[in-house]
Amino acid sequence: MARGVAAAAAMAALLVACVPAQTSSTSPSAPSSSFDDGSNNPSEPPLPGADDDLVKAAQGEGSLTVIGLARDRCNYAMIIDTFSHKYELTVSELKPSASPADQLEAIAGVDGAAAPDVVDLSIAAAETATAGLLEPFKVSTWGSIPDAVKAPDGAWTGNYYGVLSFEINTTVVPAVPQAWADLLGARYKGKVALAGDPRTSGAGAYAVYSAALANGGSLDDARKGLDFFKALETAGNLEPQVATSAAIDDGQTPVTMRWTYESLAHRDAPAGGAQIEVAVPAVGRLAVANAQAISAHAPHPNAARLWLEFLYSDQGQNLLLDGYCHPVRFDDLSARDAIPVETLAKLPDTSPVVFPTVAQQAKATDLIAANWDRVVGVNIR
């Protein structure tokens, strides 16, 4: 039975769910995309990064406070430590697992030196942030960042993105599916699982959305994704258990769909002797980006600008890619051969990808949440 408004509300609640707070501090110490929308000019190298005046002003402030940057995500441990060492600044890390809602609340309600200087948000959260909460700033590499993933005034800038991928424990399932249709085969009976409940989880809903793109749907119509998962259920291939890293490793959910920055990181560090392979289906390559922004109340505004200059420099973007988070300047870096060959060798082909707008994402996830019970009828738990 459709959940209607209640299901949509559950989805919205999940996307802004609060998480446990953590606090740490780092002191200075040694430490494929295809969304070219015409705004790039990869034939010319980007402008130099932060100038000396900005560096001196940031060093005069002495420190930077970040929030929502888990050190085991996107190589942020190395990024933070490299920045701290390079510019001789102390970096305070607030609530590494903070949700977008937590972060916006923090910059709206905390005054003084303990307030966050920068935030890491979904683009949906950045677009809907209260007016005057984010400080516009355009980094020197602004021209090589596609218009589709940046605010025209510089209030927020897309930082990295993930692409929906298949993650397979080949110790249990030797055959790696290369297309969504492959998952309907008898060899995957009871083996395919979602990384979340599509009614309440972005991880589950975006897998259904991606399946829609691969099966005759569009960014504006996700119904074909529901039809595909009904066919998967009818074939007996859909396992109702939520796929976690542990469940993948022990073979309970040997085939699932996760963002590349999750699946590739897990491929490098499986447990229990599992062998993990990652494949990105050629059709239905869905990508969603996160953004960085500066708080309008930043206690260290120059350090915040310097952080963004570093993050969007060639060095910062390559450090993100080392953590399997595709940087928004990936196309520009690739066109200039500015990505190390050893990094590229570890990446699956993700080109071309499509980026739904915030409105399209909301429409798709609401439709999936409201119609999952009626069309598919499987309780993902």
Image (tube, grey):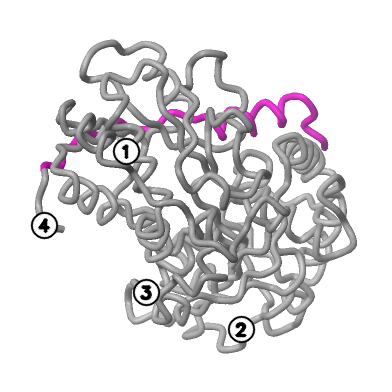
Q: Is residue 7 left or right of residue 173?
A: right
Q: Amino acid at mark 2?
A: Val
**25 vs 243, nearest the viewer:** 25
Q: Is residue 133 left or right of residue 226?
A: left
Q: Considering only order in the chain, which callout, 1 or 3, is on the residue closer to the N terminus? A: 3
- Is residue 11 within the magenta segment? yes
Between label 3 and label 2, give the one nearer the viewer.
3
Tell me the residue that label 2 is attached to.
Answer: 176
Q: Amino acid at mark 3?
A: Asp
Q: Considering only order in the chain, which callout, 4 or 3, is on the residue closer to the N terminus? A: 4
Between label 1 and label 2, give the one nearer the viewer.
1
Residue 30 - label: 4
Q: Which residues are magenta?
A: 1-27
Measuring from the top left, give residue 33's x and y in whole percent: 62, 64
Q: Considering only order in the chain, which callout, 2 or 3, is on the residue closer to the N terminus? A: 2
Residue 381 can be seen, yes or no: no
Callout 2: SS = loop
Displayed quadrant of residue 303: top left
Between label 2 and label 4, give the one nearer the viewer.
4
Q: Considering only order in the chain, which callout, 1 or 4, is on the residue closer to the N terminus? A: 4
Q: Is residue 80 above or below residue 5?
A: below
Could you tell me if the residues under marks 3 and 2 are in contact, i.e. CB atoms within 8 Å? no
Q: Residue at x 58, y 37 (%)?
A: 123
Q: Amino acid at mark 4?
A: Ala
- Is residue 34 within the magenta segment? no
Tell me the residue that label 3 is attached to.
Answer: 268
- Marks 1/2: CA–CA distance: 43 Å
Mark 1: give few (<14), some (14-19) or many (20+) Cα within 10 Å.
many
Callout 4: SS = loop
Tell me the residue that label 1 is attached to.
Answer: 306
Measuring from the top left, give residue 366's x and y in whole percent: 75, 35
